Image (tube, grey):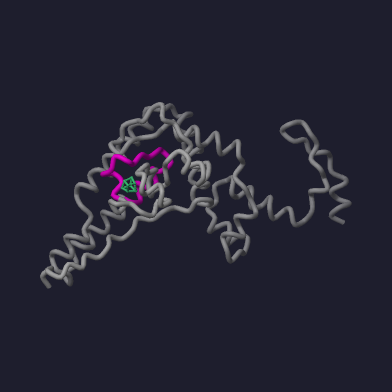
Amino acid sequence: MHRDWVDTLSDFLLDDGTIFDKEKIFPYAYRHSFAQRHADAGVPIDVLAELMDHDSYETTRSYYRVKEVRLREAVERVTQLQFDRHGARIWGAVTSVLDAERARRAIGAVVVPFGTCSEPTNVAAGGGACPLRFRCVGCDHFSTDISYLPDLRTYLDDLLRQREKLRSMSEADDWARAEATPSDAEITRIRRLIQRVTDDVDTLTVAERAEIQKASQIVRQMRQNFLGMPRIQQPLPDLRVERPA
Ligand code: SF4
């Protein structure tokens, strides 16, 4: 019945003018279309996995792909708004930050929580050997772009929450609390970086801002779905025996 119905439909013209092969229209293909349309609309993979009743994100990933042209355009747009750790625009060094793990290695950078890292040891270790415990805003090897703005804001909120929580924690020694508390310097740097990126975006026209927002969403989706986001590592415990109790 499905086949008979498909055969009654008019031809579907593709972007290049060719006619879509109707043999490719069968019930199971609808699941792929469903996944692709949701992925294109920016639905996060955990929500999509739930909608498709998948236990594993890997299964969900196999149902759609980020369209190459769309992604490339988005990456190019987003990388036009790249910044160093101080929030100064980086011009002329537009490099694809997302194409693939292989490409990123080839250009000597890895994705870190809010941007990219070019520190050679960390790059060689695939991003898992940061000598500064991911205090990226204090490191010259760090750069970021507009698509990381939501991550920067979330991180700042986390730091502020953590600081408040630790201030009211009476069950810990002062030194332990002091070492676990996010530094004012880091909070100030992150805040300043967010402000500079935001100020820069504010100079764009409404249409440009809308385009950047859309491109950022595509790039973030790609990053999340295909690369996974590195997390901030917890500081290693300090086991010096001379430490007072
Ligand atoms: S602090 Fe960030 S940018 Fe610097 S080496 Fe570590 S991961 Fe790379």
**How many marks do you count on the picture?**
0
Q: Would you say 115 lies left or right of 165 here? A: right
Of residues 116 and 63, the one drawn nearer to the viewer in this rendering: 116
- Name the quadrant containing residue 19: top right
Main structural element of the magenta stretch: helix, strand or loop? Answer: helix
- Is 39 a magenta residue? no
- Residue 159 x %, y %: 27, 54
Q: Where is residue 225 shown, x and y percent of the image?
A: 53, 52
Left/right placement of residue 231 relative to residue 196 reads: right
| Residue lying at 66% horizontally and 52% vertically, measured from the top left | 34
Does the segment drawn in magenta span residue 139? yes
Q: Is residue 210 above or below residue 100?
A: above
Image quadrant in which you'd find residue 138: top left
**Residue at 42% in and 46% down:** 111
Q: Quadrant of the C terminus?
A: bottom left
Whether 3 is drawn above or below 118: the answer is below
Q: Residue 1, how many percent across, how many down?
A: 87, 56
Left or right placement of residue 5 versus residue 58 in this view: right
Name the image quarter holding residue 87: top left
- At a point 43% along the width and 51% down the height, the residue shown is 126
User: Residue 8, how many percent across, how many down?
Assistant: 88, 45
Tell me if residue 90 comes above or below residue 8 in the rendering: above
Does 165 sit above or below residue 145?
below
The magenta segment is 135-155
